[in-house]
Image (tube, grey):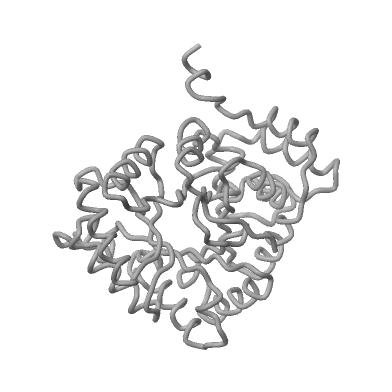
Amino acid sequence: MRYTQLGRTGLQVSRLVLGTMNFGPRTSEADSHAIMDAALEAGVNFFDTANVYGGPEHKGRTEEILGSWFARGGGRREKVVLATKVYGAMSPNSEEPWPNTNRLSAVNIRRAVDASLRRLGTDHIDLYQFHHVDRATPWEEIWQAIDVLVRQGKILYAGSSNFAGWHIAKANEAAARRHSLGLVSEQCLYNLVERRAETDVLPAAEDYGLGVIPWSPLASGLLGGAVRREREGGDSGNRSAEALARSGARERIEAYEDLLAGRGLDPGEVGLAWLLTRPAVTGPIVGPRVQEQLDSAIRAVDLELDDELLSELDKIFPGPGPSPEAFAW
């Protein structure tokens, strides 16, 4: 496994992030434990979750599964850089959230972090992430709440998710006025198919020293061999087949798979390896349902993509270009 520092911090993390969204809803507790053991054995030390993961009616279940895994000992908690998130309501989707039980008010942040700590069975969270921007709560209030949690030792770093570039700037300028560390990471949608983050999110992250943690790195399976599986009849009803049907990207995905087939490369591994060549990217989040998916992701870390292949990928999946030049002139 390869490691890097998370943004401008001294925190060393693996270049692959283990996403846990499937743990509970799609992967049993026993299988989730096995995947986490395998990830740790392979050197993956960066685990990402969220308080709302677990399914619409079982929010918090994923954090509980991580907590039961940590409870098995063997240095599991000590070896893991643990990231979770706050924003969404914890009530079942069928219920209206009670006031002050979602978003980023100081009240909800305080309650949410304590609840996550209980479910995770730990005394601190390494990276506490805002799952979405809260347009109704001032940053002065948010950073005051975070500074208290840092002083209490309940969290070490704060990060964002699904922020625009100007949100990152506004957040970190507010933190600077308080002499606080501010955001150290941004978790955003970013992959070969969806490159709009290059317009402002990645430049802002790079300028402010945030490590970028792309989610959906394979575009819901589109970049993992979706056309090949469809032709083989093995993808009926799966997310990648549904994504292929609605994406309008079939021609590009076919060209992508044909290009890689000519080089004997696996599409999913190349999709992850491409992200590791991008400026500011710390590592993509992979959310394996089964062991084989984790094994493939781990192989991607050591896959080197030459300049010719990178150029061909840019032709199939052109980025938006630098901002503001791409749209200003």
From the viewer's perspective, is residue 96 above or below residue 166?
below
Residue at 57 percent of width and 56 percent of height: 5
Residue at 46 percent of width and 83 percent of height: 68
Choose top left, top right, bottom left or bottom right for residue 295: bottom right
- How many callouts does the rendering have? 0
Q: Position of residue 222 (x, y in %)?
A: 62, 46
Q: Considering depth in this image, is 261 or 3 the residue closer to the camera?
A: 3
* Residue farthest along the front direction in this orientation: 179
From the viewer's perspective, is residue 325 above or below residue 17?
above
* Residue farthest along the top direction in this orientation: 329
Q: Position of residue 128 (x, y in %)?
A: 38, 61
Image quadrant for the N terminus? bottom right
Q: Does 275 sit left or right of 183 as displayed?
A: right
* Residue farthest along the left direction in this orientation: 99
Residue at 62 percent of width and 74 percent of height: 40
Q: Does 248 sit left or right of 227 as displayed?
A: left
Choose top left, top right, bottom left or bottom right for residue 293: bottom right
Choose top left, top right, bottom left or bottom right for residue 65: bottom left
Q: Position of residue 245 (x, y in %)?
A: 57, 41
Q: Considering depth in this image, is 231 or 288 the residue closer to the camera?
A: 288
Q: Considering depth in this image, is 239 or 62 the residue closer to the camera?
A: 62
From the viewer's perspective, is residue 255 above or below residue 35?
above
Q: Does 322 sit left or right of 261 as displayed?
A: left
From the viewer's perspective, is residue 36 above or below residue 295?
below
Residue at 49 percent of width and 36 percent of height: 197
Q: Position of residue 10 (x, y in %)?
A: 52, 59
